[in-house]
Amino acid sequence: MAALKSILGIIGIAAILVGGLWVLQGLDIIRWPASSFMLGDTTWTRNGAILAVVGAIMLWFARKR
């Protein structure tokens, strides 16, 4: 069970980081890579926010006793 919680925590952190990147690209704050189709597209802002929330929930479940 401890291994499953560790994996869930790692995936949760990765989801939060990737979701944050997507939000910042969708808001056109981070322009990397310069020719990305995600830049300035609010769809990716929404998708990134959803992914970050899912990652936070996963992290919460991983930290729960």
Image: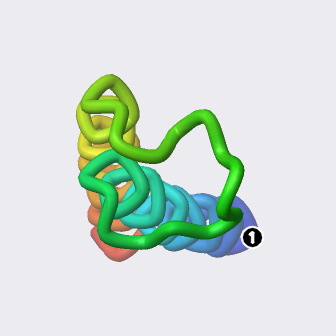
Where is residue 26? Give x, y as percent.
Answer: 35, 46
Q: Which of 10/19 is in front?
A: 19
Quarter holding the C terminus is: bottom left
Question: What colour scheme has been applied to the protein in the rendered image?
Answer: rainbow
Q: Residue at x 43, y 72 (%)?
A: 30
Q: Residue at horizontal 29%, vertical 60%?
A: 56
Foreground pick, 48 / 42: 42
In the displayed structure, 31 sits above or below 44; it is below
| Amino acid marked by disc 1 | Ala
Q: Residue at x 54, y 60 (%)?
A: 18
Callout 1 environment at 10 Å: few (<14), some (14 to 19), or many (20+)? few
Give the percent coordinates (x, y) of residue 48: 37, 44
Q: Is residue 54 above or below residue 27?
A: above
Which of the pair 17/60 is nearer the observer?
A: 17
Image location of residue 45, percent across then percent down: 28, 40
Residue drawn at the location 29% of the way across and 69% of the way down: 64
Residue beneath disc 1: 3
